C-alpha cells in the first residue's frame, strides 16, 4: 500500500515537471502575435526612416551629376567622361555602388534645354521611361532641373513620403558642395573632375520592387532595415527561464515527490553547465530567427512549440543536475561529479609518470659514463692522460707562487711528449699514404701489416676499396670478353648467309637447268631475307643502345596487343603443338607506350618460345595490374637444357642454343629488353631447371 502511494507521488512529480516545461513553452507561443505586430510597426517605421534619409535621397542627386559627367559627346567630353569614371572607381571606390547597384534599379530620362532626350534608362523591361504624366506609376518619382547656370530646382512628384523627401531633396541640392562626391572631387587637387549639370532636366523614378531591393541592399550594407524582436519578448523569455530553474530547485525539496536523485540527474557538473549556457544563448540569439521563420510559414506552430519545450527541458534538467552541489556539498560534489577534477587527477598521475621517466632517462645518461669500456686501448690512453694532467695541475696549484716555475717545466715536458707523439703519428700517416699511392698505380694487392694507431680503421676501408676495384676490373674484363664474343658472333651470323648467297650466285651463273636455277633463286631469296633481318636487328639494337630512338607514345591496351601478336604467330605454335594457358585482368590494362616497339617486344618473346620451347607442352601467360604497373609473366619448358647465365641471355648475340645450330640472330631478347627499358619499363629473364621464365613490366603512369 505504501509502495503504491510512493509511486503515485512520483508520478505526480513527473506530471508537474512536464507542466513546468509545457506551460512556459505555451506562454512563449502566445506572445508570437503581439511580437509580430510590434515588429511590423517598427519595420514600417524603419522603412520610412530609410526612404526619407539623406543617404537615400542623395543617391538621386548624385545620379544627376554622374549622368552629366559621363555623357557622350565630342572628344573633349568623352575624355572627361573617361576621367570621371576613373575618378569614381580609383579615388572614391563608388563605381560599383552606383553603376552596379543603384542606377540599374532606377528608371530615368534626361533632356536638354530644348527638350531633346540626352539619355534614358536601360533597366526598363517594358520600354517605359518616366515623364511628367506617368510618375504615379512608380513608388517614388521626381524631377530635378538645372538651368544654364547650373542652378537646381526639384520636385518630388510621387512617393508615400514625398513631402518629407522634398525637404530633404532641396536641402541636399542647396548644399551639394558639402556632399561626399563634391568633397572627393575637390580633394583631388588642381584638376577639376566634377562638373555641375547645366541645361538638363532629369526625370528619375523607381518602381516599388526596386525600392524594396535597394532597401534590402542597404540592410546588407550594415544599415538596419528589418525591425528587431521587441525587448519585452526577451524579458518574458528570461523570466520564464528563471521560473523553470526555480521549479527545478524547489520541486525536489518536497521529499514525498522522490525526484531529483534519479540517474538522469547524476552527470558530471560541466555537461549541464555547458548545455544550460548553450540553451539560454541559443534561445536569445535565435529567437528572432524562429519568429521570422514562423511568420513566413517556414516553421509551423507545432515545431516552434516543441523547440521551446526542448529549451525549457534542458534548463530544468541542467539546474536539477547542478542542484546536487547544495545537497551533496560543494567539495564532495566537485570531487565526484566534476570532469575537471577527475581530469586533474589523471593529469597529475600522468605528470608523475612522465617526470619519473625523465628522471630515469637522466639517471641512465649520467650512469652511462660508468659503463665506459675501459678495455679499448684509446679510452685507457685518454683516461690516463686526463688523470695525469689533473694530478700535475693539482700539485702545481698547491705550490702557490712556486707553481709558476713548475708549470713552465711541465709545459716543456708536455711539448716534447706531444712532439714525439706527433712524429709517430706522422710516420703512420706516411705508411697509409704510401699504400694508397701504390693502389693508385694499380697494385691492388697491397697489404698493411704495421700498426697505424688511430688510423687503424682505415685498414678496413682500404680492403673495401680493394674489393671494389677488383670487382670493377672483373666487370671490365667481362665486358671486353663480351665485346670479343660480339665481334665473333656478328662475323659468324653475317658470314653464314653471305657465304650461301655467294655460293648460290656462282652456281646460278653456270647452271642451265631451269628447275635447279629456280631452286637456287629460292635459296638466295631466303638467305637474303635472313641477311636483311639480321642487319635490321643490328640496326635496331644499335639505336636502342645509343638511346637514339624516337618514341610515338599512345594509349596502348597491352592485353589486346599481346593477343594480336599471339594470333599472328599461331601457326608456329600449332606446328610445335604448344598449348597456351592465359590469364588476363578483368579491366583494361592501358599504358602510354610506343605500339610498334611494344609489338616487337611481344613478338620477340613469343618467337623465342616457338623456337626453344619443348613441343607438346604448355605455355603459361599471366597479365596483371598491380601498384601502378602492368606486369606480363610468361613460363615455358625448354626443349634443350638451360645452361646459360640469366643475366647474359639478354645480351646481344647470346642464344640459348650455344652451338648456334638454330636460325636466329641472338638479338631477340636483347632488343626486347632495350625496347622495354627505353619505355621506362623492365625486362627480366630467369631459369629454374628447364623452366624458362620471362617478366615484362610497363608503368601505367608517367
Image (cartoon, rainbow, N blue to C red):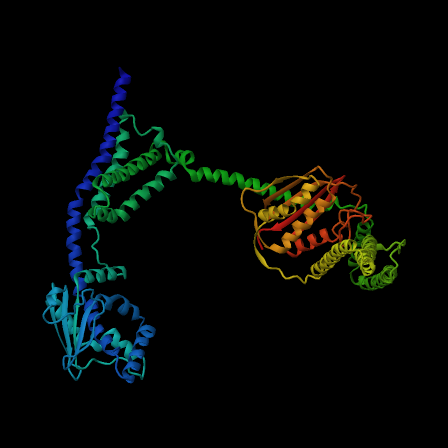
Residue 344 percent across, percent down from the top left = 47, 40
Between 2 and 663, which is closer to the camera in this rendering? 663
Spot the residue most to the front: 513
In the figure, 597 relative to 623: above or below?
Answer: below
Instruction: Name which quarter of the figure residue 255 lies in.
Output: top left
Instruction: Name which quarter of the figure residue 702 lies in.
Output: bottom right
Is residue 392 in view from this perspective? no
Is residue 485 in view from this perspective? yes
Residue 536 percent across, percent down from the top left = 71, 59
In the figure, 116 relative to 168: above or below?
Answer: below
On the rendered structure, is 192 left or right of 694?
left
Between 359 and 565, which is closer to the camera in this rendering? 565
Spot the residue most to the right: 449
Instruction: Name which quarter of the figure residue 390 lies in.
Output: bottom right
The residue drawn where x is 25% and y is 61% is 217
On the rendered structure, is 407 left or right of 683?
right
Residue 128 percent across, percent down from the top left = 16, 67
- In the rendered view of the protein, which quadrant contains the N terminus? top left
Residue 61 percent across, percent down from the top left = 20, 73
On the rendered structure, is 88 left or right of 417?
left
Q: In the rendered picture of this protein, how many numbered marks are placed on residues?
A: 0
Between 279 and 417, which is closer to the camera in this rendering? 279
Between 622 and 231, which is closer to the camera in this rendering? 622
Amino acid at each position: 500500500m505504501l509502495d503504491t502511494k510512493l509511486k503515485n507521488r512520483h508520478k505526480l512529480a513527473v506530471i508537474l515537471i512536464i507542466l513546468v516545461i509545457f506551460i512556459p513553452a505555451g506562454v512563449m507561443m502566445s506572445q508570437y502575435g503581439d511580437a509580430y505586430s510590434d515588429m511590423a510597426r517598427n519595420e514600417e517605421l524603419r522603412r520610412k526612416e530609410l526612404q526619407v534619409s539623406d543617404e537615400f535621397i542623395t543617391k538621386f542627386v548624385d545620379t544627376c551629376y554622374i549622368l552629366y559627367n559621363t555623357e557622350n559627346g565630342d572628344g573633349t567630353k568623352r575624355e572627361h567622361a573617361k576621367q570621371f569614371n576613373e575618378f569614381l572607381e580609383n579615388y572614391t571606390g563608388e563605381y560599383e555602388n552606383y553603376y552596379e547597384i543603384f542606377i540599374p534599379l532606377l528608371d530615368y530620362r534626361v533632356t536638354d534645354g530644348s527638350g531633346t532626350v540626352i539619355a534614358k534608362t536601360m533597366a526598363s523591361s517594358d520600354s517605359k521611361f518616366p515623364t511628367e504624366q506617368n510618375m504615379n506609376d512608380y513608388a517614388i518619382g521626381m524631377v530635378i532641373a538645372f538651368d544654364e547656370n547650373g542652378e537646381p530646382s526639384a520636385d518630388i512628384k510621387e512617393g508615400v513620403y514625398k513631402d518629407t523627401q522634398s525637404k530633404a531633396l532641396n536641402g541636399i541640392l542647396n548644399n551639394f558642395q558639402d556632399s561626399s562626391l563634391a568633397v572627393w572631387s575637390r580633394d583631388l587637387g588642381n584638376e577639376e573632375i566634377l562638373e555641375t549639370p547645366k541645361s538638363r532636366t532629369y526625370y528619375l523614378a523607381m518602381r516599388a520592387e526596386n525600392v524594396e531591393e535597394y532597401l534590402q541592399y542597404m540592410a546588407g550594407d550594415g544599415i538596419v532595415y528589418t525591425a528587431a524582436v521587441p525587448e519585452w519578448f526577451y524579458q518574458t523569455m528570461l523570466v520564464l527561464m528563471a521560473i523553470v530553474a526555480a521549479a527545478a530547485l524547489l520541486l525536489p525539496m518536497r521529499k514525498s515527490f522522490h525526484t531529483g536523485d534519479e540517474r538522469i540527474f547524476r552527470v558530471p557538473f560541466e555537461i549541464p553547465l555547458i548545455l544550460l549556457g548553450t540553451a539560454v544563448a541559443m534561445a536569445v540569439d535565435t529567437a528572432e530567427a524562429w519568429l521570422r521563420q514562423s511568420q513566413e510559414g517556414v516553421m509551423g506552430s507545432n515545431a516552434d512549440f516543441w523547440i521551446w519545450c526542448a529549451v525549457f527541458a534542458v534548463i530544468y534538467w541542467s539546474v536539477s543536475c547542478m542542484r546536487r552541489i547544495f545537497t551533496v556539498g560543494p567539495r564532495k560534489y566537485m570531487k565526484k561529479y566534476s570532469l575537471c577534477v577527475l581530469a586533474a587527477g589523471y593529469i597529475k598521475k600522468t605528470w608523475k609518470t612522465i617526470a619519473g621517466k625523465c628522471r630515469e632517462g637522466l639517471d641512465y645518461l649520467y650512469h652511462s659514463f660508468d659503463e665506459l669500456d675501459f678495455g679499448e686501448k684509446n679510452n685507457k690512453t685518454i683516461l690516463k692522460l686526463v688523470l695525469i694532467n689533473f694530478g700535475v695541475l693539482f700539485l702545481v696549484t698547491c705550490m702557490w707562487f712556486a707553481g709558476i716555475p713548475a708549470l713552465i717545466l711541465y709545459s716543456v715536458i708536455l711539448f716534447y711528449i706531444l712532439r714525439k707523439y706527433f712524429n709517430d703519428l706522422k710516420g703512420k700517416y706516411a705508411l697509409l699514404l704510401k699504400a694508397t699511392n701504390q693502389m693508385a698505380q694499380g697494385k691492388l694487392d697491397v697489404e698493411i701489416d704495421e700498426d697505424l694507431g688511430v688510423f687503424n680503421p682505415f685498414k678496413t676501408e682500404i680492403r673495401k676499396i680493394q674489393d671494389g676495384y677488383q670487382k670493377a676490373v672483373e666487370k671490365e674484363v667481362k665486358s671486353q670478353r663480351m665485346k670479343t664474343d660480339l665481334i665473333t658472333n656478328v662475323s659468324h651470323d653475317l658470314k653464314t648467309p653471305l657465304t650461301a648467297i655467294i655460293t648460290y650466285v656462282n652456281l646460278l651463273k653456270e647452271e642451265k637447268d631451269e628447275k635447279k636455277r629456280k631452286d637456287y633463286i629460292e635459296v638466295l631469296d631466303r638467305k637474303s631475307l635472313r641477311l636483311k633481318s639480321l642487319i635490321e636487328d643490328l640496326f635496331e639494337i644499335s639505336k636502342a643502345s645509343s638511346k637514339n630512338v624516337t618514341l610515338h607514345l599512345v594509349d596502348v591496351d597491352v592485353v589486346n596487343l599481346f593477343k594480336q601478336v599471339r594470333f599472328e604467330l599461331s601457326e608456329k605454335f600449332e606446328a610445335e603443338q604448344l598449348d597456351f594457358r592465359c590469364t588476363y585482368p578483368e579491366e583494361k590494362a592501358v599504358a602510354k607506350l610506343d605500339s610498334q616497339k611494344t609489338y616487337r617486344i611481344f613478338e620477340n618473346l613469343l618467337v623465342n618460345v616457338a623456337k626453344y620451347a619443348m613441343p607438346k607442352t604448355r605455355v603459361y601467360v599471366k597479365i596483371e595490374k598491380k601498384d601502378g604497373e602492368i606486369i606480363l609473366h610468361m613460363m615455358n619448358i625448354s626443349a634443350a637444357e638451360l645452361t646459360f647465365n640469366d643475366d647474359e641471355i639478354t645480351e646481344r648475340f647470346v642464344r640459348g642454343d650455344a652451338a648456334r645450330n638454330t636460325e636466329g640472330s641472338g638479338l631477340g631478347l636483347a632488343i626486347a629488353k632495350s625496347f622495354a627499358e627505353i619505355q621506362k619499363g623492365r625486362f627480366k629473364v630467369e631459369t629454374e631447371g628447364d623452366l624458362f621464365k620471362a617478366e615484362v613490366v610497363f608503368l601505367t603512369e608517367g
